[in-house]
């Protein structure tokens, strides 16, 4: 029976149009995973100033960002060009096993590495990016392949971020000048490169970006996605986002990103993901980042909880240094998230949004569920040793515990058919400041 069922699934082919592609069921691993790690790493990590958009802010936008101009004037010789940063992208301390250990310890279930950002530099030896890739210059290493092996050996899913456009590629600039009526860049650079990347590394997430200047018809997005879903080596497990052309975000593709750091006010009807960065000012490494500009642990955990309660996945970004180190403060954040998930992960992984996602009676709480078990995230320490929950419908067999402590807690009904007041134990001090109640046999 299993074999027949698989055959019937794979025999239905997707056609290169949004109606067909949008109807593809999302592979279940993705919704169950809940937490991923995002990594922005490339030549932009070498100047390490402003953000990963440094080249654009320095030499693309008009007028240029004066702080970037001043940074170059003070620190580099006249006439220094952005490509001259590439040989300084040494990655000499890059140990993919160490990185993968940190990601595993964070409790994340998937990892998304920047394969190519808007600067066009590829973190593998792309045959379509001669001399502007990590094998021909800089690290002289296949960064995409090396990290992929380490991540997968720890049973984590591996995904790749890929920018569709490249700020200064001559073929792209020419297509742009032609009002995107020509597709020289797409046919000779972009598509051959993506096919090579997918066949070679078999990513389970394609995190597309840089789509907004041109329509999906210019990028050949529907044809690419039809190939990914029908014939690629990852057709059954691949997950894609919604950045496939101007106007596609929040409408077409796999799961929805909608916009960076997207936070919906209520439960969306479609699977979504919030991508955000520990460094609130940049996705890439900044030499001059300050502690006050970083998300602290309570903020990260509350953000994760709210995202999952509203049906989303949480993709948390770190920017490594050009020599291949994950800054110690980022490592501390990731390991601390993992320590919280060691106790509370049961309420996160493979959970579903409950019929009510949040309420605020005693203190603000958020809900997730698994069948007749409901999890209650307490995001503020209650002023009294009791918390009132008005939404759950209890039964005589309802049992309440605090995750991390098997002792049953005393509770009393608020109304005959709904609500309960839970007598809390002394809540342990935790850096994350979010505690989780487990309510069994409730509706």
Image: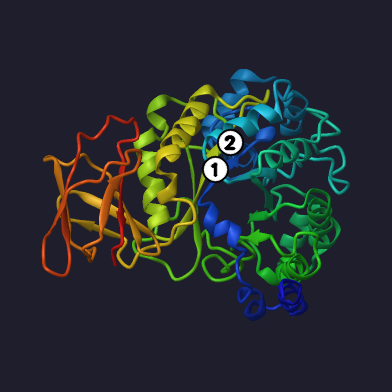
In the image, taking residue 147 as reference, residue 366 lies left or right, namely left
Quadrant that contains the C terminus: bottom left
In the image, taking residue 397 as reference, residue 57 lies left or right, namely right
- The figure's colour scheme reads rainbow
Callout 1 touching callout 2 (CB < 8 Å) = yes
- The reply to whether residue 19 is in sight is yes
Q: Place residue 88 in its image quadrant.
A: top right
Which residue is identified by label 1? Answer: 108
At x 35% / y 44%, what residue is drawn?
302
Q: Residue furthest front?
A: 397
Of the numbered discs 1 and 2, the one sitting upstream in the chain is 2
In the image, taking residue 262 as reference, residue 430 lies left or right, namely left
Which residue is identified by label 2? Answer: 103
At x 34% / y 37%, what residue is drawn?
298
Give whichever of 211, 103 is nearer the camera: 103
At x 49% / y 30%, what residue is drawn?
335
Quadrant that contains the N terminus: bottom right
Q: CA distance from mark 1 to mark 2?
A: 6 Å
Q: Position of residue 139 (x, y in %)?
A: 78, 27
Q: Position of residue 367 (x, y in %)?
A: 32, 56
Q: Place residue 213 in its image quadrant.
A: bottom right
- The reply to whether residue 180 is in sight is no
Q: Position of residue 308 (x, y in %)?
A: 42, 54
Q: Place residue 154 in its image quadrant.
A: top right
Instruction: Name the secondary structure under disc 1.
Output: loop
């Amino acid at each position: 029976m299993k074999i027949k069922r698989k055959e019937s699934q794979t025999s239905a082919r997707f056609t290169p149009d949004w109606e067909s592609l949008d109807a593809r069921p999302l592979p279940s691993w993705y919704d169950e995973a809940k937490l991923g790690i995002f990594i922005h790493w490339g030549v932009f990590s070498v100047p390490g100033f402003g953000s990963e958009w440094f080249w654009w802010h320095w030499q693309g936008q008009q007028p240029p960002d004066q702080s970037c101009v001043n940074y170059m004037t003070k620190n580099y010789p006249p006439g220094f060009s952005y490509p001259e940063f590439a040989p300084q992208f040494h990655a000499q301390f890059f140990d993919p096993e160490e990185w993968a250990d940190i990601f595993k310890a964070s409790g994340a279930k998937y990892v998304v590495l920047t394969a190519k950002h808007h600067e066009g530099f590829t973190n593998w030896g792309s045959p379509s990016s001669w001399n502007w890739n990590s094998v021909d210059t800089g690290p002289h290493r296949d960064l995409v392949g090396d990290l992929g092996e380490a991540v997968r050996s720890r049973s984590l899913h591996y995904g790749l971020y890929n920018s569709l456009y490249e700020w200064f590629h001559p073929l792209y600039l020419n297509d742009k000048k032609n009002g995107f009526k020509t597709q020289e860049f797409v046919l000779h650079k972009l598509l051959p490169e993506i096919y090579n990347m997918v066949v070679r590394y078999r990513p389970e997430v394609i995190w597309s970006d840089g789509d907004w200047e041109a329509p999906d018809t210019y990028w050949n997005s529907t044809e690419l996605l039809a190939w990914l879903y029908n014939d690629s080596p990852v057709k059954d497990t691949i997950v894609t986002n919604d950045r496939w052309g101007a106007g596609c975000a929040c409408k077409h593709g796999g799961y929805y990103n909608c916009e960076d750091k997207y936070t919906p006010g209520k439960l969306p009807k479609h699977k979504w993901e919030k991508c955000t960065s520990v460094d609130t000012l940049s996705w890439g490494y900044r030499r001059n980042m300050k502690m006050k500009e970083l998300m602290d642990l309570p903020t990260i955990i509350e953000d994760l909880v709210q995202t999952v309660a509203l049906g989303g996945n949480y993709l948390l970004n770190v920017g490594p240094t050009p020599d291949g180190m994950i800054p110690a403060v980022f490592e501390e954040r990731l390991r601390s998230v993992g320590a919280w998930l060691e106790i509370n992960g049961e309420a996160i992984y493979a959970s579903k949004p409950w019929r009510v996602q949040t309420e605020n009676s005693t203190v603000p709480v958020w809900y997730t569920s698994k069948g007749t078990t409901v999890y209650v995230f307490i995001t503020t320490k209650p002023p009294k040793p009791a918390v009132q929950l008005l939404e759950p419908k209890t039964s005589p067999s309802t049992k309440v515990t605090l995750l991390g402590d098997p002792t049953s807690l005393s509770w009393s009904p608020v109304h005959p058919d709904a609500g309960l007041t839970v007598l809390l134990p002394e809540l342990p001090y935790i850096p994350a400041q979010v505690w989780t109640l487990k309510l069994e046999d409730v509706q």
